[in-house]
């Protein structure tokens, strides 16, 4: 939980925050949990706000490689095992 201020500092909102994207498996777990908590009829905005998609239509993407023992090379387009 973090506390953030809104409305020019006049109100306080407490938010649950996922770990950063660099934490790998922890971030993926947090994202799947937050998507599972949404109603299936919720509409998501995609493609820079020009398209919409329901939560039930959102693709489930599995990680092809584990997040340990690999390093990203070639401008992030390839992974190599250590």
Image (cartoon, rainbow, N blue to C red):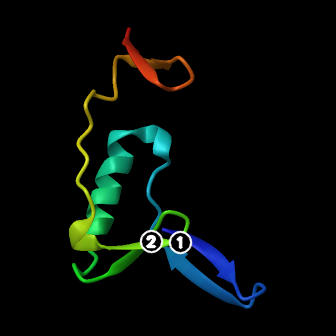
User: Gap between marks 2 and 1, in whole Å?
Assistant: 6 Å
Query: Is residue 51 or residue 6 the one in the foreground?
Result: 51
Looking at the picture, how far across and down is residue 38, in whole percent? 28, 77
| Classed neighbour count for the residue bearing mark 1: other residues with Cα under 10 Å, few (<14), some (14–19), many (≥20) | few
Relative placement, left or right, of 23 versus 28 is right
Q: Farthest top residue?
A: 82
Q: Farthest right residue?
A: 8
Q: How many marks?
A: 2
* Residue at x 38%, y 39% (from the top left corner): 24
The image shows residue 22, relative to residue 82, as above or below, that is below
Query: Is residue 49 or residue 11 the one in the foreground?
Result: 49
Residue designated by label 1: 49
| Classed neighbour count for the residue bearing mark 2: other residues with Cα under 10 Å, few (<14), some (14–19), many (≥20) | few
Query: Is residue 80 or residue 16 the one in the foreground?
Result: 80
* Residue at x 63%, y 84% (from the top left corner): 12
The image shows residue 35, relative to residue 71, as above or below, that is below
Relative placement, left or right, of 6 versus 13 is right
Element under label 2? strand
The image shows residue 12, relative to residue 58, as above or below, that is below
The image shows residue 38, relative to residue 10, as above or below, that is above
Q: Farthest front residue?
A: 50
Quadrant in which the C terminus appears? top left
Residue designated by label 2: 51
Looking at the picture, how far across and down is residue 54, in whole percent? 29, 75
Looking at the picture, how far across and down is residue 3, in whole percent? 59, 73
* Residue at x 28%, y 58% (from the top left corner): 32
Looking at the picture, how far across and down is residue 5, in whole percent? 68, 79
Q: Are marks 2 and 1 in contact (CB under 8 Å)?
A: no
Locate residue 4: give its quadrant.
bottom right
Element under label 1? loop
């Amino acid at each position: 939980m973090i506390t953030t201020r809104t409305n020019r500092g006049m109100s306080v909102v407490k938010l649950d925050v996922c770990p950063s994207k660099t934490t790998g498996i922890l971030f993926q777990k947090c994202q799947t949990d937050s998507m599972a908590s949404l109603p299936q009829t919720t509409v998501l905005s995609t493609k820079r706000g020009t398209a919409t998609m329901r939560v039930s239509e959102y693709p489930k993407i599995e990680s092809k490689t584990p997040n340990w023992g690999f390093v990203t090379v070639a401008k992030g387009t390839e992974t190599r095992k250590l």
